[in-house]
Image: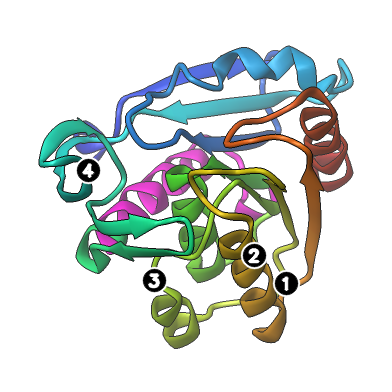
Amino acid sequence: MSNAELLPCVEIETADQPTASVIWLHGLGADGNDFSGIVPDLQLPEQLAVRFVFPHAPHMPISCNNGYVMRAWYDILHFDQMSRQADVAGVKASVEMIRALITRENQRGIPSERIILAGFSQGGAIAYTAGTLHPEKLAGIVALSTYLPAPELIQAGLSNQDTPIFAAHGSADPVVGLALGEAAKDKLGELGFTVSWQTWPMQHSVCMPEIQAIGQFVRQRLA
């Protein structure tokens, strides 16, 4: 993928000349603006210069929504609280799009071990997949209210298990059931990843204590 074909992104830099990057992927039907307002709430120290990259997923028809076209990282053929049937080819395509964004950060002077991949819901599913399959260690993966869309890809293509993972979920999530999040956490643990797991009494959303915990993870990984 050439630079001309890179996904459009919202970018926020906390200071001049960033020395680290966070690539944050939105959920189904949202866009890159969805989480851009979260940056101040992470309460990062002033001396930590971070570039936040919030890409917009492509538009595509979503089978489980009667073919309605919306921004998405892959098609969902079927879903309920306990399972997802993802279009695996679409998952692979999005992983390549995110890999291209990581490469651009490398080209801008940010090594992979200074890059965190974050995502919510469907974006978190791609953060999980792209992060665990990346050929170089990343600073971390943040996976919020999400699941593994194609566990067989991760099992077949593991590159490193050194990238630490922060995973969190709402205990009353009616969209992505808590059991899906727990299954992802357990599977990654079996594969040798270190997963920090937290739940919060909420539905399919984020809350301020969770955001503060994410900020702490980002500080720990990038300080």
Confirm whether the magenta stretch covers residue 109. Answer: yes
Instruction: Give the image location of residue 107, x and y in percent.
Output: 47, 41
Using the numbered discs, state the Cα–Cα distance from disc 3 to disc 1 in whole angstroms.
20 Å
Local crowd size for mark 3, using a 10 Å CA cut-off: few (<14), some (14–19), many (≥20): some
Tell me the residue that label 2 is attached to.
137
Sequence order check, earlier mark of 2 and 3: 2
Q: In what element is the residue under mark 1?
A: loop
- The Cα atoms of the two marked residues, 4 and 3, are separated by 26 Å
Circle 3 residue: 150
Check disc 1: other Cα within 10 Å, few if <14, some if 14-19, many if 20+: some
SS class of the residue under badge 2?
loop
Residue 170 against residue 184 in the figure, above or below: above
Q: Earlier in the sequence, mark 4 or mark 3?
A: 4
Look at label 1 and name its amino acid. Answer: Asp
Q: Is residue 131 left or right of residue 4?
A: right
Mark number displayed over residue 162: 1
Label 2 near label 1: C-beta < 8 Å? yes
Between label 4 and label 3, give the one nearer the viewer.
Answer: 3
Structural distance between the alpha carbons of marks 4 and 2? 23 Å
Please, what is the three-letter code of the amino acid marked with disc 2?
A: Lys
Locate residue 28: give its quadrant.
top left
Indicate the secondary structure of the residue bearing disc 4. loop
Category of crowding for the residue at label 2, using alpha-carbon neighbours closer than 10 angstroms: few (below 14), some (14–19), many (at least 20): many
The foreground one among 160 and 109 is 160
Assess disc 4: are there few (<14), some (14-19) or many (≥20) residues with their C-alpha within 10 Å of its C-alpha: few
Which secondary structure type mostly characterizes the magenta part of the structure?
helix
Image mark for residue 2: 4
Q: Of the residues tagged 3 and 1, which is closer to the observer?
A: 3
Amino acid type, callout 3: Ala
